[in-house]
Amino acid sequence: MNKVMLLMLAATLTACGPSQLSETVDALTANPERIKEIQRLCKEDRAKVDDELCRRAAEAAKRRFYGDRPEQKPR
Protein backbone atom coordinates (compact mmCIF):
# COMPACT_ATOMS: atom_id res chain seq x y z
CA MET A 1 0.00 0.00 0.00
CA ASN A 2 2.76 2.45 0.88
CA LYS A 3 4.53 1.84 -2.44
CA VAL A 4 1.35 2.65 -4.33
CA MET A 5 0.92 5.89 -2.40
CA LEU A 6 4.52 6.89 -3.09
CA LEU A 7 4.12 6.19 -6.79
CA MET A 8 0.93 8.26 -6.90
CA LEU A 9 2.64 11.10 -5.05
CA ALA A 10 5.62 11.00 -7.42
CA ALA A 11 3.33 11.04 -10.47
CA THR A 12 1.36 13.96 -9.08
CA LEU A 13 4.47 16.01 -8.32
CA THR A 14 5.92 15.28 -11.75
CA ALA A 15 2.76 16.60 -13.41
CA CYS A 16 3.04 19.83 -11.42
CA GLY A 17 6.49 20.68 -12.74
CA PRO A 18 7.25 23.92 -14.59
CA SER A 19 5.73 24.05 -18.04
CA GLN A 20 7.83 26.93 -19.37
CA LEU A 21 11.10 25.06 -19.87
CA SER A 22 10.72 25.26 -23.64
CA GLU A 23 11.15 29.05 -23.56
CA THR A 24 14.87 29.25 -24.17
CA VAL A 25 16.84 32.46 -24.45
CA ASP A 26 17.12 31.95 -28.22
CA ALA A 27 13.37 31.43 -28.60
CA LEU A 28 12.64 34.51 -26.51
CA THR A 29 15.16 36.59 -28.47
CA ALA A 30 13.12 35.91 -31.59
CA ASN A 31 9.88 36.95 -29.86
CA PRO A 32 10.12 40.47 -28.38
CA GLU A 33 6.43 40.57 -27.42
CA ARG A 34 6.88 37.50 -25.22
CA ILE A 35 9.94 39.10 -23.59
CA LYS A 36 7.84 42.15 -22.70
CA GLU A 37 5.06 39.98 -21.31
CA ILE A 38 7.44 37.96 -19.13
CA GLN A 39 9.21 41.09 -17.89
CA ARG A 40 5.86 42.62 -16.97
CA LEU A 41 4.90 39.48 -15.04
CA CYS A 42 8.28 39.42 -13.31
CA LYS A 43 7.75 43.00 -12.21
CA GLU A 44 4.03 42.97 -11.32
CA ASP A 45 3.14 39.39 -10.35
CA ARG A 46 6.25 37.44 -9.46
CA ALA A 47 4.22 34.48 -8.16
CA LYS A 48 3.17 33.55 -11.72
CA VAL A 49 6.72 33.11 -13.06
CA ASP A 50 9.86 31.53 -11.72
CA ASP A 51 13.26 33.16 -11.34
CA GLU A 52 14.80 31.17 -14.19
CA LEU A 53 12.25 32.45 -16.71
CA CYS A 54 12.84 36.03 -15.55
CA ARG A 55 16.59 35.52 -16.06
CA ARG A 56 16.02 34.10 -19.54
CA ALA A 57 13.83 37.07 -20.49
CA ALA A 58 16.47 39.48 -19.21
CA GLU A 59 19.20 37.73 -21.20
CA ALA A 60 17.03 37.72 -24.34
CA ALA A 61 16.30 41.45 -23.94
CA LYS A 62 20.01 42.11 -23.51
CA ARG A 63 20.83 40.15 -26.67
CA ARG A 64 18.21 42.07 -28.65
CA PHE A 65 19.50 45.38 -27.29
CA TYR A 66 23.09 44.62 -28.25
CA GLY A 67 22.08 43.47 -31.74
CA ASP A 68 22.21 39.68 -31.46
CA ARG A 69 18.82 39.20 -33.14
CA PRO A 70 17.90 36.28 -35.38
CA GLU A 71 16.67 38.64 -38.11
CA GLN A 72 20.10 40.31 -38.28
CA LYS A 73 22.12 37.17 -38.95
CA PRO A 74 23.40 36.77 -42.51
CA ARG A 75 21.73 34.15 -44.65
Image: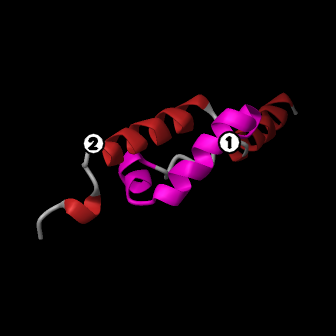
Above or below, comparing residue 26 to residue 30 in the picture: above
63 sits to left or right of 45: left
Give coordinates of residue 29: x percent, y percent: 38, 52
**What residue type is disc 1 on?**
Leu
Give coordinates of residue 48: x percent, y percent.
73, 40
Between 69 and 15, the one lying in front of the other is 69
The label nearer to you, 2 versus 1, is 2
Q: In the rendering, which numbered label is found on residue 52?
A: none
Residue density around tag 2, few if under 14, some if 14–19, many if 20 or more, within 10 Å: few
Q: Residue at left 78%, top 32%?
A: 6
User: Residue placed at 49% from the left, 32% from the top?
Assistant: 55
Earlier sequence position, callout 2 versus callout 1 = 1
| Alpha carbon distance from label 2 to label 1 | 23 Å
Callout 1 secondary element: helix
| Front residue of 65 and 45 | 65
Residue 25 occupies which quadrant of the picture? top left
- Which part of the image, by quadrant, shows the N terminus? top right
User: Please, what is the three-letter code of the amino acid marked with disc 2?
Assistant: Tyr
Relative to 31, say whether 57 is above or below. Answer: above
Q: Is residue 36 magenta?
A: yes
Q: Is residue 8 left or right of residue 62?
A: right
Residue at horizontal 46 percent and vertical 36 percent from the top: 58
Give the magenta part as a residue range. 24-48
Which residue was labeled with disc 2? Answer: 66
Q: Is residue 30 left or right of residue 16?
A: left
- Residue that label 1 marks: 41
